[in-house]
Amino acid sequence: MSWKASLSRHLPVVRFFACPKSPASRGVIGWFDKNYEELKMLNPTMPLLLRCSDNAMPAITTELDFNTSHLLRFMLQTNRFKSDERINAAKKFLGYLNDPALKKEYATSRWNSPGFDPWRPFLDEDNPDWKMDKKIGKDLGRYIEIHDELESTWNVITSGPNDEYTRAENALLMCQRVDLWCAGEAEVEAALRHLLNLGKGCNDLEPDLPEYITEFRPGASDL
């Protein structure tokens, strides 16, 4: 029961697909019928949806908040990079993502030039040579260095042939779905627990409540 109670903390929605006429969907429909009331009692705010249609592939889907780190690790683990250059670039970029000090330096160095924001919309169109400005170039030297290095590394990662990067993105998105053709009820439960484990690593649905009151508004003056 414990894992069922944690579904809504890690998955925003769970959708079951089945064909009501097909024996291949009996496992999905049977497990849903037997567990829906318990799941809804333990997760009252999470949508639990059963979609039935003729000739539908029995499956479970959810929504996972994959980020760049998840995608690069997925590509490395499944050997989707076809060159050592892109493998090294991916590891280098992951090193940046896992370095809080460097990420903080990159974020704070953005403001080193008073009155100028290198992230301003349409900046490169309005002033394509802003990096050549002596004052801005000096103030933002560290920011430009980190930014150019990240941009160069990212261009190497996404430069693979045959839409290598895009294909990997699509493959990772398919991890939000588990097909259950002719699966029994035990396999359906195992598939849901698998999606839950993925959600624990990808989704952050629990609100970050403040440790103390940050705002105070006095009541009506006439009370």
Image (cartoon, grey):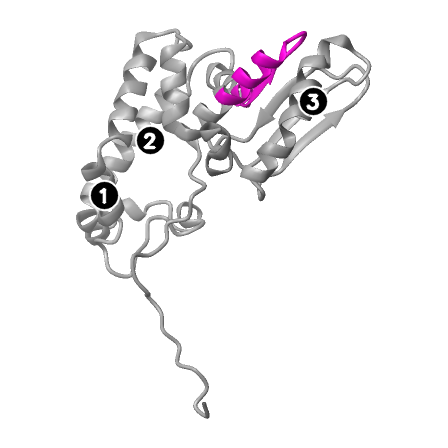
Residue 165 visible within the image: yes
Label 1 sits on a secondary structure element that is helix
Picture disc at residue 104:
1
Label 3 sits on a secondary structure element that is strand
**Mark closer to the chain start, 3 or 2:** 3
Q: What residue appears at the point 22 percent right and 33 percent down from the top-left corner?
A: 99
Q: Is residue 122 above or below residue 179?
A: below
Dominant SS type (magenta): helix
Picture disc at residue 151:
2
Of the 4 image quadrants, the one containing the C terminus is: bottom left
Q: Marks 3 and 2, Cα distance to the nearest angstrom?
A: 41 Å
**Mark closer to the chain start, 2 or 1:** 1
Answer with left or right where residue 18 lies relative to residue 8.
Answer: right
Q: Is residue 166 above or below residue 149?
A: above
Picture disc at residue 184:
none
Task: Report x, y in % for residue 8.
Answer: 51, 37
**Mark closer to the chain start, 3 or 1:** 3
Q: Amino acid at mark 3?
A: Phe
Q: Marks 2 and 1, Cα distance to the nearest angstrom?
A: 17 Å
Q: What residue appears at the point 52 percent right and 16 percent down from the top-left corner?
A: 190
Q: Amino acid at mark 1?
A: Lys
Q: Please name whichever residue, 152 or 49, is drawn nearer the observer in this view of the structure.
A: 49
Task: Report x, y in % for residue 114.
Answer: 24, 60
Residue 67 visible within the image: no
Residue occupied by mark 3: 17
Q: Mark 3 packing: few (<14 Cα in 10 Å), some, or many (20+)?
A: many
